[in-house]
Amino acid sequence: FETVDDGDELFAKFLNTNQNPGEKPSKYLQRLQIALNKVVKRGGMVASDSDRQLLKQFCRGCWDNSIITSLQLEQRKNKPLSFPDLLLMLRVEEDKHATKSNRMKQHFGTFKSEVQTNSLKVDEAAQCNQWPNDETNPYSY
């Protein structure tokens, strides 16, 4: 038998729903929306308050503070966006982050290979210079 939760119990579960490790903020928002729809259907909250509660819980349970800050989501709690608008904003911001991250990886990958091709170990340098005796070798101790 499956237990049937009433609206209040579902709302309590909703308030304890956090972003999972590795989960994108947009996926977390979608998961919250599904949970919130169940709360409203079971009478745990009025539908007119759902956007506010969704944004409030998203800000509380999302671990990606940079996206919350860049979209100024904390400041929007009094006048929250609708679910579709918020989802679109998150996806656009996630795409920006991913693009920048890829550019950074490419840049550092290029920089890293340049540094590696120009590197020379101390032992190799000593062999190239062929110091006449150990006294002139700055690397002998």
Image: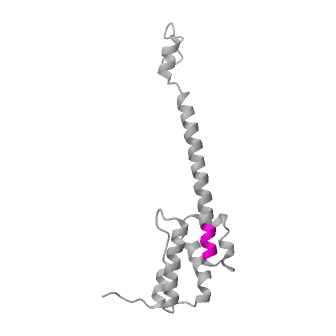
| Quarter of the image that includes the N terminus | bottom left
Predominant SS along the magenta part = helix
Is residue 19 rendered to the left or right of residue 49? Answer: left
> Does the stretch in magenta take in 57?
no
> Does the stretch in magenta take in 85?
yes
Q: Can residue 66 be seen in this view?
A: no
* Residue 65 or residue 24, whichever sits in front: 24
Q: Residue 102: where, in percent of width, then height?
A: 57, 50
Give the residue furthest to the top: 132
Q: Residue 63: where, in percent of width, then height?
A: 54, 66
* Residue 126 or residue 6, whichever sits in front: 6
Q: Residue 94: where, in percent of width, then height?
A: 59, 62
* Residue 13 or residue 28, whichever sits in front: 28
Q: Can residue 110 be seen in this view?
A: yes
Q: Residue at x 51, y 93 (%)?
A: 43
Which stretch is magenta?
A: 84-90
Q: Which residue is drawn at 54% across and 35% down?
A: 113
